[in-house]
Structures are given as structure tokens and as C-alpha cells.
Amino acid sequence: MTRGFRVACIARQCSSEQRRSSYRSMADAQKDPAMDEPFLSNLDLFLFLFSLIAGLIVYWMVFRKKAEPIPEFKKLESTPQTTRDTSFIDKMKKTGKNIVVFYGSQTGTAEEFANRLAKDAHRYGMKGMSADPEEYDMSELSRLPEIENSIAIFCMATYGEGDPTDNAQDFYDWLHEGDANFSGVKYTVFALGNKTYEHYNAMGKYVDQRLSELGAQRIFDLGMGDDDGNLEEDFVSWREQFWPAVCEHFGVEATGEESSIRQYELKVHSDVNMNKVYTGELGRLKSFESQKPPFDSKNPFLAPVTVNRKLNKAGDRHLMHLELDITGSRIRYESGDHVAVYPINDSVIVSRIGDLLGVDLDTVISLNNLDEESNKKHPFPCPTTYRTALTHYLDITNPPRTNVLYELAQYASEPKEQENMRKMASSSAEGKALYQSWVLDSCRNILAVLEDLPSLRPPIDHLCELLPRLQARYYSIASSSKVHPNSIHICAVVVEYETKTGRVNKGVATNWLKNKTPTDNGHKATVPMYIRKSQFRLPFKSTNPVIMIGPGTGIAPFMGFVQERGWLKEQGKEVGETVLYYGCRYKNEDFLYQEELEEFEETGVLTELNVAFSRDQAEKVYVQHLLKRNKEAVWRLVHTDNAHIYICGDARNMARDVQNAFYEIAEELGGLSRAQAVDYIKKLMTKGRYSQDVWS
Ligand SMILES: Cc1cc2nc3c(=O)[nH]c(=O)nc-3n(C[C@H](O)[C@H](O)[C@H](O)COP(=O)(O)OP(=O)(O)OC[C@H]3O[C@@H](n4cnc5c(N)ncnc54)[C@H](O)[C@@H]3O)c2cc1C
Ligand SMILES: Cc1cc2nc3c(=O)[nH]c(=O)nc-3n(C[C@H](O)[C@H](O)[C@H](O)COP(=O)(O)O)c2cc1C
């Protein structure tokens, strides 16, 4: 669909270009003085017209068929390469697949689940493939019944205000606007979300309902995965009921045990040109050496770190302010956007994995997909070394999922260890409880698993095949592009905690960023980054008041907002009230950006600076308490003055507590019932006057 549109645009562009050139030649001709004098005699003109007509008749008779104009876009659409690439139906038919698992995924979980479901199909005598909706022509879904016993499974994550992931956006728009007929299409949906968000699993619910409205047949109930609880367990439990339902539906029997099938084969490169080996690039080889815009998730910009300072004056945490230089990158951002950074794993953990598995991490390898029809040729850029894969491409610090434990279990030589690994991957109550306590509650990463199961020594290439990809981390930009067009500011807290096993786990990105000092042994320290646009925006009219609520690192986007309001004032614009509710533990310890904020208050850019110091007194005081304390002023701003409300920071507790505070204020000062107050805030959200930028 997209390709067709693009080609049509190119065609349109060509014809307008032709029109422009013919206008140009007419104009040129009009300016030519020679045009004033006739240069053809009447005879010449007659002969010319005669030969022209005769020529045209011959041409029409001989070449008529060949000369039929073929629009350029048709030629492109019929190219076999293009058709094969975007047609999932053709691919399924060609490779004998009857299950297609689409995923809407931002940080890889839904994609992982889709891959697992596609692999599962084998156990039931079926064949599955996972598919990115962005890569295929989704209008083909209505053709799925052409394939016998076929099912489309959708693993859909939700983001923002109930929005689809980037790769599912076009599919969502098409479903929303279209009126396809899906009769005969069999489907099921597993939704991935987090209960702490207002629009819990909104995308999964939407796709489930919309497919049914368009005539598709739901063959198993919508699965609801909650990342705030145990998403893995939700998925495993749903899956265990889903497959028997599919078997019953089609009258087939499971062929046997879950089997371990390798998806990639190892190739060791003994004699390789090191210039052809990936060293951490996400897309194009050598893209880190020769940087070329535009910069995005596949082509991040290496931004030099120009400032890295500790923000807190005391305490055992480390809160930091970083500035990334984007001069010359052509990167543009708005206050409220996010910057995504690609971190790298701790070299100590990488080396330790290599030591435990007894491998030379500098071996150059490729993992090649055994399915030659797959769009994904390798699990990460190849050829590369094991060290690069474990450092740049693979997630080695999150607790491994149950399928990883299941597949690795075959390499545990000690029967008890093998049994426990299989148990944790099973759907039995005992197995789930063991996985919860031994892996999740104990925060065991793959290194801790290898250390604590001494008989488990898998081949490193299989481990690399199973581990998920290391994901970029997002940070709410703490600067305004109006004031800082060439730099992007980050405000972050370093993650470090002790686990139940006595190990100290360190957050990948924040510990890596902490050590990014502007000059690193004489070299500029750089960070691979790109911008992710958000909906978190200051009001269009600067005269609208704003109430910003952002405790802790939730202050980040508001540093940008306040800078921007100050800049608008400097430009002579009228700016509405700018009210900030900020929170920290102790005034003398972690009052981030104290000097800057107090100066904004003194100069009148900030009309109110309300700070909740939670631990400076016996009673805990949080931002929601201050909002309630100032309820009259808050209600006036919201109800009478059309203020826009912004909340940033912790999704789990703070965002919910603040929302409750608004309900209470609306009840008390607006004379509303709780249901009406809830409705009141919902309406503000719909109008874009209650926005959240929260994470958990
Ligand atoms: C849209 C968005 C905007 C964000 N903006 C900001 C921002 O402005 N500033 C900011 O600091 N962060 C922000 N974050 C969070 C940020 O992206 C990272 O998640 C955070 O910095 C941690 O990354 P890390 O790689 O250091 O930690 P990771 O290696 O990812 O480790 C973090 C994980 O460790 C675990 N964990 C952490 N503490 C404990 C504990 N005490 N006990 C047990 N387990 C624990 C949790 O599972 C947690 O998810 C934002 C996130 C999103 C999605
Ligand atoms: C910034 C952010 C916003 C989110 N918004 C929502 C939401 O509105 N509703 C919801 O149910 N889950 C929300 N989630 C949770 C994700 O959908 C969930 O973690 C999911 O497992 C992510 O899948 P993925 O890794 O495939 O992208 C959000 C998560 C983040 C980090």
C-alpha cells in the first residue's frame, strides 16, 4: 500500500517536472527575438505537415500495441521481488506455513512472543511464521482462508495513551479507516500492556474487537498480559490453553513434546576481512565511522557528551545531568520529545560469560537463518564477534524468559538442574512459583543462572540465538530546542540495587552513561542516539496556564518546558501562569536543578514553584499532598482558566496518586460525584489538557 502510494507520488512528481520544463521552453521561446521573423515558407510548411501526418499513420499502424503507455507504478508493482517481499500469503503458501503471527512491538517483547508462538506450531503438526505488519501488505489478511487450517495470531503491545507501537501504526490506521471483509479469517490476539497505565492493553483489545467487527472468527479468547505483574506467566498460561483450543478447532493432535529446534546455524569465519565485521553498528556497516543523516533507530547519531555532572549534593544515589551535542547532525527536536540511547553491556559481565563457557569471545561468527525465505537473515548484525554480540546486541542483564531456560536445559549435565529448568518453563503451579522466586524475585540474569547452575554449559552460539536484543533506553529530553538547538539534555538516576542472592545489579544504560565524561583518554565520549517524537507538548497558545507535576527525574521534560516559556517571554509573547509541582527526598540532598528553578521563579518565568520534600519531616509529603493543599488555586487554573496539566515520572504509584488527587479536588470544589470527577478528567485527557509522560 505504502509502496504504491510512493510510486504514485513519484509519477505525479515526474509529470509536474515535465510540465515545468515545457513551461520553461515556452517561456524561453517567447523571449527569443528570432521568433518575430517567419523562417518557414508555405511549401516547407505543407511538406512538413504532410510528412508528419504520414509518419503518424505509419506509427499508429505498426507500433500501436507496443506504445501503450504503462504507468510507471504498475511496472514496479509487478516486479517479482517486490511482490514476494510484501505478500505474506505467497510466502506462507510457498513455505507450507499455515500460522502467521503478527507483532506490534516497540521494545521487543511482543516480537519475542510472536517468535515463540510461530515455533510452537511445530508441536501441533502445523508450521508458523512471525511477521512484522510494517513489512507486509496487511490487506492480504482477507485472503488467509485460501490456506487450509490457517490462523492469524496478533501479539500487540500498547503505548502512550493507548496507542499502537510504531511498527503497527499503519496497520492500526488501515484497520480503523478500512472496511475489509474478513469472513473466513480465523484469529486470536494476545495483548501486552501494563495495568498501571490508564489505557490498559488498549491496542490488543482494539485489534481483537475490530477484526471481529469486520467478520473474522475469534478462535480463542483475547489474552491479557500485564507487565506490572508477571507478563511471562500471563503469556505462558494463555498459550497453554490456546494450543489445545486450536487443535480441537481443527481436529488435530499434538505431535509431542516441546522440541528444541535451532533457527540459526553457526558459521565461524576463520579468514575474514575485519573491515567487513560489525563492531556494534545497528544497520549499515561502518556507520559509526562515516556518519550520514538522516539519523534514526537503525542509524543512530554518535553525539559527543559535552557535560556530565552529578545533580544531587548528598545521599547514596547518583542523579546526573548530561548534555549531548547534536551540532551538524540535522537532528531537530521539540520540548517533550524523548531521546533514545543505545547503551552497551558491562565488559566484566561479557568476559565472565566467555570464561564460564570457555570460549574465545573474539571468534568471528555469523548466525544464519535456516529458513531462507525469512526476512530476518541473522538475529543481530553478522558477521561479528561473540564479544560484540554480547556487548552491543544482546540483553544479558534482564532475567531470562522461560523459553530460554527450557531450551538451555538440555545442556545441564546434572539431572536435578535440568529438571528444575524444565519445571520453571512449564505451566505447572510449582514451576511458575519456582520461576517467580528463583529467577524474577532474585533478579537472576543469565550470568547468575550460569554461575548458580554449574553443570549448565550451553554452546555460546545457541545462547546468542536465544537471548533477546539489547534495547535502546528512552529519556525525556530536559531542554528546549528554542534555547538549546544544538544540544539535548538528559536527567537520569543511576540504577543499582542488591539482589536477594547478594549480588549487586547495575542498570545497563545509566551506569554506562555515568562514566561518559566529555573527554575519555583524550577522545570525545559519544553516545549513539536518535529522537522519538512524542505527544507531550506545551499548549499551542502560550497564554494558556500550565500545571506541571514531576517529582524526581520526572522534572526532566519540565526543564525544557520552563526554558521554552522563558524564551517565549523574552520574545515579547504573553505567557500564561507556569506552575510546577516538584518532589524530592531532602532539600539539602536531591533538590535537582535547585539554582535554575529558583532563578526561574525569581524572574517570573515560573509563577509557582511547589516542592514536596518527602523525608524532611516525620510525615511523608508528596506532590499529590501539595496539590490538595493548594486545591482552590489548582481548581481555578483547571476549571476557570483552561490550564493544561502535565505529569511526568513514576507510572506505578505517583501518576495514579496524582490522578486521584485531581478526582478529589474536582469532587470537593466542583461539587461532582466520583463518577463525574472521573469523567471530568477523562474529558481533559481527550482534549489533550491532561497529558502523561510516565514509565515504570
Ligand atoms: C518514555 C520514557 C521516558 C523515560 N525518561 C526517563 C528520564 O527522563 N530519566 C530517567 O532516569 N529515566 C527515564 N526513563 C527510564 C529509562 O528509560 C531507563 O529505564 C532507566 O534509566 C534504567 O535504565 P538502565 O539501562 O540503567 O537499567 P536496566 O538495566 O534497564 O535495569 C532497570 C531494571 O532493573 C530492575 N530494577 C531496578 N531497580 C530495582 C530494584 N531496586 N529491585 C529490583 N529490580 C530493580 C527493574 O526491572 C528495571 O526495569 C524513561 C523511560 C521511558 C519509557
Ligand atoms: C512509555 C511506555 C508507555 C506505555 N503505555 C502503555 C499503555 O498506555 N497501556 C498499556 O497497557 N501498557 C503500556 N505500556 C506497557 C507496554 O505495553 C508493555 O511493557 C509491553 O510489554 C511492551 O511490549 P514491547 O516490548 O513488545 O514493546 C507502556 C510502556 C512504556 C514503557
Image: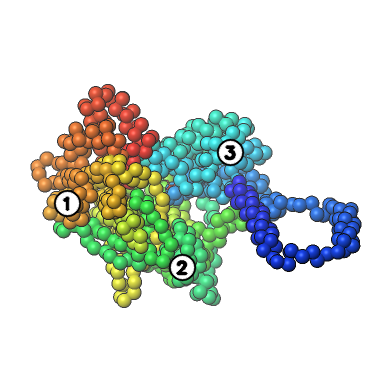
Residue 602 is labelled as 1
Q: Residues within 10 Å of mark 2 (few under 14, many from 20)?
A: some
**Which residue occupies 46% across, 45% down?**
165
How far apart are labels 2 and 3 at the CA level? 43 Å
Is residue 78 among what the camera can see? no
Is residue 94 among what the camera can see? yes
Residue 468 is labelled as none
How far apart are labels 3 and 1 at the CA level? 64 Å
Placement of 333 over or under 178, stated as above or below: below
Closer to us: 97 or 88: 88
**Which residue occupies 22% across, 36% down?**
634
Say which label, 1 or 2, has the lower sequence index: 2
Q: Secondary structure at mark 1?
A: helix
Q: Position of residue 632 (x, y in %)?
A: 19, 32
Q: Position of residue 552 (x, y in %)?
A: 23, 49
1 and 2 marks in contact (CB < 8 Å): no
Q: Position of residue 389 (x, y in %)?
A: 44, 63
Please name which of the two marks, 2 or 3, marks the residue nearer to the observer: 2
Q: Residues within 10 Å of mark 1 (few under 14, many from 20)?
A: few
Say which label, 3 or 1, has the lower sequence index: 3
2 and 3 marks in contact (CB < 8 Å): no
User: Is residue 342 rendered to the left or right of residue 655?
Assistant: right
Q: What residue would you read off at disc 2? A: 291
Q: Secondary structure at mark 2?
A: loop
Q: What residue would you read off at disc 3? A: 151
